[in-house]
């Protein structure tokens, strides 16, 4: 029963990747990024404003960290996906996102002192080659000549931003309940994104784009984090994180059904190689360097 929670979370996130693509031509990227968090803030405020304000001393001590987390996880990660959508496919976006567990693992080694494993090294190489294969449409020579597509490049930066967000979230361990910490970041995201919203062109909300904004607000911004945290609570982080590997698969299936995107051979090869690398890093836990045996006492 508890496995339904992380499964719902990755389904919501995969659906949101397709929604990112649907926003192209319907609403400007800065608009949907801002309205998404504004509406989430409005929905959460009646339930979370009072308990969050009661934790003001904790918020004040950690205000700089909360600003950084909101900037990385809400502003950069989410907004870049909307800016990337006109230049790449939803299927490509899902495959690039599948690098996130691998990036988080590398950052955990660098920032949290986690031991480097052989699986992490080999898996990182496999996943990176898989993503390059997708970005080059199965022709690495063309990638060397023409460079990375701007949309895919933006998704790489977005994925790296969220991996850094996840690592800092674990490193700092801010002593707030999960929903209060999420609410504080949502409020800060509205503040951070307001200048970009005011300076960017705006189409305004209408009957065609409002459902897209509401999906991003309700399902991707609130329901997905809530079901994901519930999964971690009952299943533990290791078993829950494995479900994230379903994101590119579900994204490709939804994109095929909703956007009529077709899966090319390079998607299957590159996506499979990327997933294989992630799974290898999670399962092959042998340390890269064995600890030296203690010197015998004379």
Image: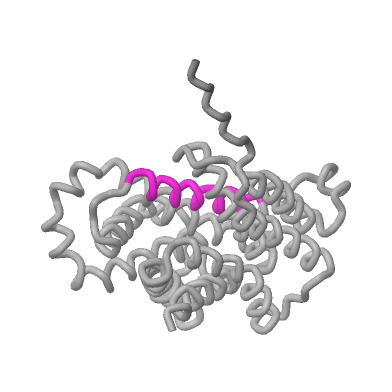
Q: Is residue 264 above or below residue 283?
A: below
Q: Is residue 219 above or below residue 168?
A: below
State the residue in front, 241 or 185. 241
User: Residue 227: horizontal and vertical position, in percent?
Assistant: 40, 73
Instruction: Tell me, yes or no, whether the highlighted magenta stretch contains residue 155.
Output: yes
Would you say residue 205 is visible in this rendering? no
Would you say residue 253 is visible in this rendering? yes
User: Residue 14: horizontal and vertical position, in percent?
Assistant: 56, 72
Most extreme residue toward the front is 298
State the residue in front, 164 or 137. 164
Secondary structure predominantly adopted by residues drawn in magenta: helix
Q: Quadrant of residue 247?
A: bottom right
Instruction: Tell me, yes or no, whether the highlighted magenta stretch contains residue 264.
Output: no
Q: Is residue 234 above or below residue 117?
A: below
Q: Quadrant of residue 21?
A: bottom right
User: Residue 154: horizontal and vertical position, in percent?
Assistant: 61, 51
Relative to 138, is 248 on the left or the right?
A: left
Q: Write down the region rendered in magenta.
A: 153-172
Most extreme residue toward the top is 298
Q: Residue at x 49, y 54 (%)?
A: 77
Q: Residue at x 31, y 60 (%)?
A: 182
User: Residue 250: horizontal and vertical position, in percent?
Assistant: 62, 75
Q: Residue at x 60, y 36 (%)?
A: 290
Q: Quadrant of the N terminus?
A: bottom left
Q: Is residue 2 above or below residue 188?
A: below
Query: How was the colour assigned to the protein in this rendering?
Result: one colour
Relative to 162, is 54 on the left or the right?
A: left
State the residue in front, 241 or 210. 241
Count of all numbered marks drawn on residues in the image:
0
């Amino acid at each position: 029963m508890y496995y339904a929670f992380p499964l719902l979370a990755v389904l919501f996130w995969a659906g949101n990747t397709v929604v990112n693509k649907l926003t192209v031509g319907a609403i400007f990227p800065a608009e949907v990024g801002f309205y998404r968090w504004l509406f989430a803030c409005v929905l959460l405020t009646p339930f979370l404003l009072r308990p969050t304000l009661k934790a003001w001393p904790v918020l004040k001590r950690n205000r700089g960290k909360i600003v950084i987390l909101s900037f990385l996880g809400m502003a950069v990660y989410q907004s870049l996906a909307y800016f990337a959508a006109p230049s790449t496919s939803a299927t490509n976006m899902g495959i690039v996102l599948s690098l996130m567990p691998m990036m988080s693992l590398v950052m955990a080694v660098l920032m949290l002192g986690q031991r480097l494993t052989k699986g992490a090294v080999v898996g990182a190489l496999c996943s990176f080659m898989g993503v390059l294969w997708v970005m080059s449409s199965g022709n690495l020579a063309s990638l060397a000549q023409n460079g990375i597509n701007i949309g895919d490049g933006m998704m790489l930066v977005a994925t790296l931003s969220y991996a850094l967000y996840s690592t800092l979230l674990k490193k700092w361990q801010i002593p707030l309940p999960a929903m209060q910490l999420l609410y504080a970041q949502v409020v800060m995201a509205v503040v951070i994104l307001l200048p970009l919203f005011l300076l960017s062109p705006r189409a305004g909300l209408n009957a065609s784009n409002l459902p897209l904004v509401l999906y991003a607000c309700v399902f991707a911004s609130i329901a997905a984090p809530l079901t994901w945290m519930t999964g971690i609570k009952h299943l533990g982080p290791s078993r829950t994180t494995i479900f994230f590997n379903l994101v590119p698969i579900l994204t490709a299936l939804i994109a095929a059904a909703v956007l009529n995107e077709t899966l090319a051979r390079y998607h299957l090869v590159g996506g499979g190689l990327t997933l294989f690398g992630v799974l290898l890093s999670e399962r092959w836990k042998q340390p890269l360097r064995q600890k030296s045996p203690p010197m015998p006492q004379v």
